[in-house]
Amino acid sequence: MEFCDECGSMMKANDGRWECGSCGFTKPKGDADEYIVTDDQEAGEVIESSGETSLPETDARCPECGHDRAHWYMQQIRSADESETRFFICSECEHKWREDDN
């Protein structure tokens, strides 16, 4: 990824040159060995799971299978001034659902 020296926008590769879509600035791409390919780095960041979770468990009825226990976690998915959303994962069938405060 390359950023424009003039305006700071992200540049696009085009025929051996970097081109800025905002201000039109261009520059040569340079040697390929100056750039880092991140495919291997991203693959190394994958975490394998043993199937067991470290999430806390609570009484919650699964809408899919009716089981009465589920793992849960909370996540802020709306604006900061609104409450977090609670997510549940059934400990029996692994169905996932959410519960919002409305």
Image (cartoon, rainbow, N blue to C red):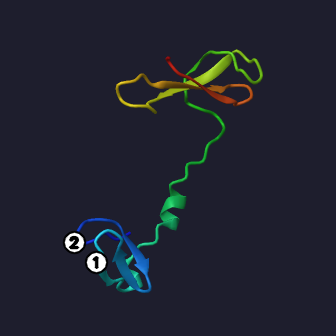
Query: The N terminus appears in which quarter of the rendering?
Result: bottom left
Other-residue count near label 1 (Cα within 10 Å), few / some / many at <14 / 14–19 / ≥20: some
Could you say which is closer to the camera, residue 84 or residue 74? 84
Which residue is drawn at the image coordinates 24% and 67% (left, top)? 7
In this rendering, does residue 34 appear at all? no
Residue occupied by mark 2: 6
Amino acid of disc 1 = Phe
Q: Position of residue 84 (x, y in %)?
A: 45, 25
Residue at (30% x, 65% y) in the render: 9
Q: Can residue 46 be seen?
A: yes
Numbered disc 1: secondary structure: loop
Q: Residue at x 43, y 31 (%)?
A: 78
Q: Earlier in the sequence, mark 2 or mark 1?
A: 2
User: In the rendered structure, are the residues bearing label 2 and label 1 in contact, judged by CB atoms less than 8 Å apart?
Assistant: yes
Task: Report the residue at 52% width, 21% height from top.
Answer: 100
Q: Is residue 55 above or below residue 7?
A: above
Q: Which residue corresponds to mark 1?
A: 25
Left/right of residue 3 with respect to residue 78 in the rendered view? left
Q: Does residue 15 appear left or right of residue 34 in this picture?
A: right
